Amino acid sequence: MNAMHFTRRAALAAALAVALPVAVAQTPSGQPIRIGSTLALTGPLAATAQIHKIVGDIYVEQLNKRGGLLGRPVEWIVKDDQSKPDLARTLYEQLITADKVDLLMGPYATGAILSAMGVAQRYDKVLVHHTFGIPSLAKYDMQFPAWSLGSEPATTMPNTLFDALAAGPKPPKTVAVVTSKFPSVQFMSAGAREVLKKRGLTEVLFLEWDFGNRDFGPIANRIKDAKPDFVWVGAIGLDGNLLLDAMKKIDYVPPQHFYMYPAPGPLVSLPEAKNALAATIFEEQPPFTSNPGAAEFVKVYRERATKAGLADPSVETQAAASYTAWQILEAAVTATKSLDDKAIAAWLKANRVDTIQGKLRFNGPSNYGDDLMRIKQVQNGHWVVVWPKEVTSGGAKLQAN
Amino acid sequence: MPGFTLPSATLLAQSVLSGIFVGALYALMGLGLSLSWGLLRVINLAHFAFAFLAAYVCLQLATHGVDPLLTLLGIVPAFFVLGALLHWLMTRFRMTTFNSLLLTFGLMGIVEAVIQTIWTADFRKLESAYANQKFRLGALFVPVPELITLVLAVSLALAIWAVLRFTDLGRALRAAAEDAPIAAAFGVDHKRNGLLLAGTCAALVAIAGVCIALTATLAPSQMYAWIGVVFAAVMLGGLGSAIGPLVAGMLIGVSEAVTMAVTAPSWAPIVSFTLLIVVLVFRPGKAA
Amino acid sequence: MSKATLAILVVAAAMALLPLAGLPAFYDALLYLMLHWIVLATSWNILSGTTGYFSFGHGAFFGAGLYTTSTLLARFEWPFLWTLPVAAAVAALLGTALGAVVFRVRSVRGELFALLTLAVTFVVGTIVGNTPIDGGQGVSLTSVPVPHLGPTQSSTFYLLALAAATLTLVVARAIFFSRFGAGLLAIHDDEDAAEVMGVPTYRYKLVALAISCALAGVAGGIHALFLSYVTVGEVFTITVPLTVVLMSVLGGTRHWAGPAVGAIAITGLLYSFTAADHAVAGKAAIGAILIAAILFMPAGILPRLQRAWRSVVRRGAKTSAGVAPSLAAAAPPPRASPATSAGDVVLRVSGLHKRFKGVRALAGVAVDVRRGEILGLLGPNGSGKSTFINVVSGHYTASAGEIVFEGRALAGTPAHRIAAGGIARTYQIPRPFAHMTVLDNVALAAMFGGGVATPRDARAAALQWLDFTGLAAKADALPDELNLHQRKFLELARALASRPRLVLLDEVLCGLTPSEIDDAVALIRRIRDQGSTIVFVEHVMRAVMALTDRVVVFNHGELLAEGNATEVMQRPEVMTAYLGKAHAPLPTAAPPSAPSEERAHA
């Protein structure tokens, strides 16, 4: 009896001893740690880059509330690369050599990330980046992806998708592949064509259009004529919407359809996008929201995004990858207790990081880890994750038109 | 080389129709540009900015429940004034043609910044009652927003053509474009006419903007995406022509659409622009 | 070597040492971008600013160079520096091929040329994007070794761009101050007149285009490796051509260094507003600054700076005395001709036809012009006199017939060769080159028709001709500061500067006052006395009687009469032609009065 009493009191004391320092918010002190990056705050890529700006602001603010990095306050120096890769390159060089930032964060979009990677490589800096679309081009040793595409997305992603379709109510037999020629989309669509052939499906149509194409009428018509069971749309940005608009105009609804990288907000709000499929690493629903930091982040992001006037204030791939990137950087710095890029890189390659996407590893080809791409679907005006079963909630299932 | 597929008649016809619609939009965008370039000797890049500004204003009003077409009642006069104001500024400083290019480019940057500040860089789509309506013409679909654009484009082009051809104002404008001092000696008040015309051009492009809002998704940086093809339509149709941009726009739109219907869509620009080059070299002065 | 060229080289040498100064490496990258745009804008101006053929296709040539380099690097693993001359060559080839076709078509000027070049950009871009050259996925050059020209990688690009910019500026300056450049500037003002003055317009435009494209190609090649990942969507758009136009217009297109100034200004502007907090406002600010700049500096930044400089270093005011043609100076005689003596036929025209879509302007004209004579070309309005001059001088090509000048057949010869071969003409409505001074107008003719090699010598010769025609005091004026009389004499001076053996004058006296006519007549006589043969179209009968040895009368495109002036004018058919049938004289003995002076038609 006495022993238990003692243990309980000791346990309480011990708990208090631990809880107290943590409960009191530590104000970071000392020289700020400066993290530098660029974002496409103006220009054609601005629509998505503004998401990364909001996420970065949220993260740095929360980070400083938690005591900063290594006890020091964190300052984020972000510049506008105007959607131009050559400007991104120059600005990263400025950040490193003139502004002398301690750490780098990646920019938005594949072109700018490649430019930044080149600069990082020349100065031996670690580069954690959010959404880089072409893993095979990521040849720098100290770059780390926050977007869990896996190192062979052109094969793994279509396979995941076709698995989902095969397990669904109407497994397709004929497929139409229509795609933009935008670099990060084109190779994925090429991979999809390989995969569907291997799985014994028939390709009834293959079309490529120029990025910047405005008239999707003929393309919609050709899809309708081909009568596919399933349409793979290698869309990026607005393409998906424009194609759906065009299909609506000719009264055509594809039985099942998938969009590669749609601009998230606009697609989900389109009535004709019913049952459209897409890929994602994170959605605002369990089980994702039970990952570390996820629930809180989703709430704060929604507030900030609404305040900033964004049409769609929900967290999905872009915002999630952005937040993950910061988590990765913080974890590595905290674990190695240093700002030494080589040490950070070495640690990341050897360890796993807890993020809102789950536990990530970086020891695969090109520092890529697991493929965490899931399939989601527009159901009743919301994105609902439908595959694989482990990550669905509430009995969500893939539906067909 | 891409393969060719023989399209069904319906596919071909629907594609041609699609090309006509997109061409009508090029024409509507280009009409004001052509008139101001040909008759006022001003290359007005700000037209693209005005179009998108009008589109966004229409969008905003529509979200408050105003019918998109009704917004024209307010938008047209407002942009008329804006266009006249801009022209007044340019004549006051005696801008040459290429100086006007620079000035209006600067204006584009300002308008883009304003749009991005108010509406953010997000993609925005106008959901109107018209968006879902369409007619059937046999096996062909004719969506209402596109039809509205086509009707507006054709009727405005014809109206302007008639004014230029048959009215005193039109004659005065054409005379002043050819030789301003002599025209002035004959009593042509080019100042007043210029303001009228500039205002009209801006109003025309504002109408184009409303059509864009009805048919396309908006983003601030999209305004630059139209410059290339609209310039092409304007130059091919002949500067200062009212029907020219219409014919040229349709030509470009249809040739691209047909290409997309029979072969790889990514080859579409090559067909339309090679056609342009061939026409220019072997039958120059083609203008409608 | 001129002072300016020396200055460029010195500055370039100094700038080459910048990477060693220990500044943060990013300055190299920033300056690289500035130099890169200097090359693009200046090279664009070499064709478009000088000749006025505004090209919207600079992106195509830049892209051609860029993709040449990236293909050679990625696919054939060439060393980087060797790809640059190839990039230049490919771009130049593309431009030359385009120009060879397009410049032949007379009506493709102005905006049609702009459209054509824009279309070429999209065509080339689509080809590159749909073939294995790029194919859509872009070309990655990250594993290509960058040569070690400087302490950092960025400095390598900086030095390469510095070299390219230096070359471009030196070339641009050389062109502007050369005979070639004078010809290009003349094309800008009046291409047809330039051709008739002896400028080989087709060849010159082609050469200017080739040089412009080659330089753009080099810039493209360097930029490929700078980007290290190239995609079609970034390159073959209207952005590059629009930006170079803006830079050149802002800096000033009529000066060789104008575009460079504009490039520095705009790059600097774009770069100053990269702080994230003001990114969007920055865009508006840039727009506002551009607007303000062009409103207050309409000719461009550089001319404005030059004006400010000049007003600081002001010379004495120019005298603007009224010009009374002082016909004192003697002028150089026309160039030696094949051995002929006075009285030989110097120009023989037979069976000359000229049709304009159904209008027969000339219907089988046969005329002989003898050395040293003054031949008058008369006839009512619309009879084909001006057309005759236009055809002989090469302004139009004959529909049929033969023209033999000093034993050589002229039919089909381009106008500039005719001008260099000894024939000169004036225009009835003077067509001086509006943006060139009076002196330069005449110097141009001296260089091209008259075969003088350098602009400096040509100006010296021109001054003599201006003396001869009494315009020396107006040498530095622009043509629109002259009155009609002076402009006519400018036409004459220009015609004479090419040292012609045959001078074709088209109604040179129309619009002049009687005393001015007397001066002109005296001048014409002196011209003949020096050894030129003169054919002149005229309505002023007084002058015709006074000057001509012979006259021919045209009517409805045919030769009506020929012979001594007084005698021909009295023939009934000639009077009918001029005055109409109702005025045909009745056969009387009294000599009819000379037909009244007609006002020439405009």
Image (spheres, coloured by chain):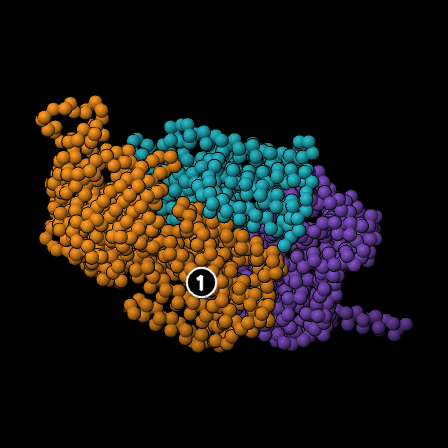
The residue located at (70%, 67%) in the rendering is: A368
Quadrant of image for the C terminus of chain C: top left
- Where residue C132 appears, x then y in whole percent? 61, 60
Which quarter of the rendering shows the N terminus of chain C? bottom left
Instruction: Examine the rendered structure and indicate whether residue A93 appears above or below residue B208.
Output: below
For this view, does B61 lie left or right of residue B187? right
Residue A33 appearing in the image: no
Chain of the residue displaying label 1: C
Q: Residues within 10 Å of mark 1 (few under 14, many from 20)?
A: many
From the rendered image, report the letter of the chain displayed in purple.
A
Residue C389 falls left or right of residue A331: left
Colour of chain C, in one word, is orange
Q: Is residue A4 visible?
A: yes
Q: Picture quarter containing residue A362? A: bottom right
How far across and how far down the image is residue C437, in percent? 24, 53
Pick whichever, C163 or B204, lies toward us. C163
Q: Colour of chain B?
A: cyan
Name the residue carrying label 1: C214
- Where residue C562 sits: x, y (%)? 20, 38
Q: Position of residue A377 (x, y in %)?
A: 75, 50
Q: Nearer the viewer, residue B257 or A5?
A: B257
Residue at disc 1, secondary structure: helix
Front in this rendered view, residue B45 or B135: B135
Residue B69 picture quarter = top right
